[in-house]
């Protein structure tokens, strides 16, 4: 299957540069897989589609201010470091620009409080750094780092909390699980009052989610590992829901990848790594429905939703969204696949 099969033309002005004024007032495109119909709504209408027979699975990861600008010791050359994952205590895997300037032994200074020494070189601009700091690491990041907004967002974010879900809890992501940005606490309360159970999982978003596909055949694409956690409570509740025949509705592609990775006859508690790559031809084990955003052309994410709803139907829906001037990508509008 060719990567170009998942390409589409998107007018630049439809790339959302800022969140909607109210989280749940973004638009919602509803796709019915069985009837092959498309409807236009607002996100607060999602309550119409969720009942006591549905389980809503959310990713409660929290974005860290992971983008750091520093200078090389001795030369003062500027280096950008995007923290991806803490692989060992104080050892971080990070995207580095320009990577060619950073060799093993290179020291990067971010301030008097924080320095990084390159101790490993990996492919695609990734380096391993040993962090040396004074104080509490996350507090230093809050001072020095910025939110790792995608490169297609060029406007400054006035409120950094708008790049966090209202239920963000577990620090560790290099990007937000953006399908969850549409929920308000009030909307979640309404959903629960209708009998829909909300179950959290955690997947820390890293390179596996947003790495571009750089091969012609999608089967040749390699997904990077991301860390996820399934709590004992969540595993128990999900197993009970399956035994009762309830529908599992995932909020975002990270939730769907977590559940499909974890399930092997039942859900298993623990912390694991996943590099699952879902594309058309994949048989879903447990997920029935999906709330998601509109994704980049030729991305692994549009391939995933095409596996769930069918490529032709997804491409038709994307064209309708473009025709109706929906807003795309991280701060854009939403889609519900049922």
Image (cartoon, grey):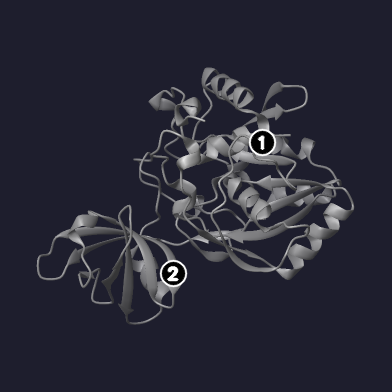
Quadrant location, the C terminus: top right
Q: Is residue 54 left or right of residue 281?
A: right
Q: Nearer the viewer, residue 203 or 141?
A: 203
Q: Nearer the viewer, residue 9 or 266?
A: 266
SS state under label 2: strand
Q: Residue at x 61, y 50 (%)?
A: 257
Q: CA distance from mark 1 to mark 2?
A: 32 Å
Q: Residue at x 34, y 40 (%)?
A: 154
Residue 222 locus on image (x, y percent) = 46, 48
Instruction: Answer whether residue 331 is visible to the viewer in this image.
Output: no
Q: Is residue 208 above or below residue 221?
A: below
Q: Is residue 15 left or right of residue 122?
A: right
The image quadrant that residue 105 belongs to is bottom left
Instruction: Judge depth for marks 1 and 2 and give the one in front.
Output: 1
Q: Residue at x 50, y 39 (%)?
A: 219
Residue 58 locus on image (x, y percent) = 66, 53
The residue to which callout 1 is attached is 308
Q: Residue at x 46, y 55 (%)?
A: 206
Q: Is residue 284 above or below residue 147?
A: above
Residue 8 locus on image (x, y percent) = 46, 24
Q: Nearer the viewer, residue 117 or 44?
A: 117
Within-10-Å neighbours for mark 1: few <14, some 14–19, many 20+: many
Within-10-Å neighbours for mark 2: few <14, some 14–19, many 20+: some
Disc on the earlier residue, 1 or 2: 2
Q: Which mark is residue 86?
A: 2
Specify the farthest residue to the left.
75
Q: Is residue 263 above or below residue 89?
A: above
């Amino acid at each position: 299957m060719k990567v170009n099969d998942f390409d589409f033309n998107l007018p630049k002005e439809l790339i959302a540069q800022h969140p909607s004024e109210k989280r749940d007032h973004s638009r919602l495109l509803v796709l019915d897989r069985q009837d092959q119909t498309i409807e236009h709504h607002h996100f607060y209408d999602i309550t119409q589609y969720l009942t006591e027979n549905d389980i809503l699975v959310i990713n409660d990861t929290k974005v860290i201010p992971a983008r750091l600008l520093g200078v090389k010791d001795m030369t003062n050359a500027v280096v950008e470091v995007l923290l991806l994952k803490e692989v060992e205590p104080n050892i971080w895997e990070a995207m580095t620009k320009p990577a060619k300037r950073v060799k093993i032994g290179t020291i990067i200074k971010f301030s008097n409080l924080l320095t990084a020494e390159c101790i490993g070189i990996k492919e695609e601009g990734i380096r391993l750094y040993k962090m040396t700091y004074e104080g509490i690491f996350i507090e230093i990041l809050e001072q020095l780092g910025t939110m790792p907004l995608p490169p297609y967002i060029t406007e400054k974010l006035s409120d950094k909390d708008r790049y966090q879900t209202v239920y963000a809890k577990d620090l560790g992501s290099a990007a937000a699980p953006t399908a969850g940005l549409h929920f308000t606490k009030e909307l979640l309360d309404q959903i629960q009052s209708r009998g829909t159970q909300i179950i959290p999982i955690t997947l820390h978003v890293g390179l596996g989610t947003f790495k571009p596909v750089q091969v012609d055949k999608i089967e040749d694409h390699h997904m990077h590992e991301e860390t996820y956690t399934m709590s004992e409570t969540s595993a128990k509740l999900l197993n009970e829901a399956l035994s009762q025949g309830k529908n599992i509705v995932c909020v975002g592609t990270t939730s769907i990848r977590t559940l499909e990775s974890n399930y092997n006859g039942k859900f298993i508690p623990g912390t694991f790594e996943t590099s699952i790559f879902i594309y058309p031809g994949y048989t879903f084990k447990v997920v029935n429905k999906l709330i998601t955003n509109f994704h980049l052309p030729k991305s692994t994410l549009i391939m995933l939703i095409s596996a769930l709803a069918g490529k032709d139907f997804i491409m038709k829906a994307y064209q309708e969204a473009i025709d109706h001037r929906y807003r795309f990508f991280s701060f854009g509008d939403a889609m519900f696949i049922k």
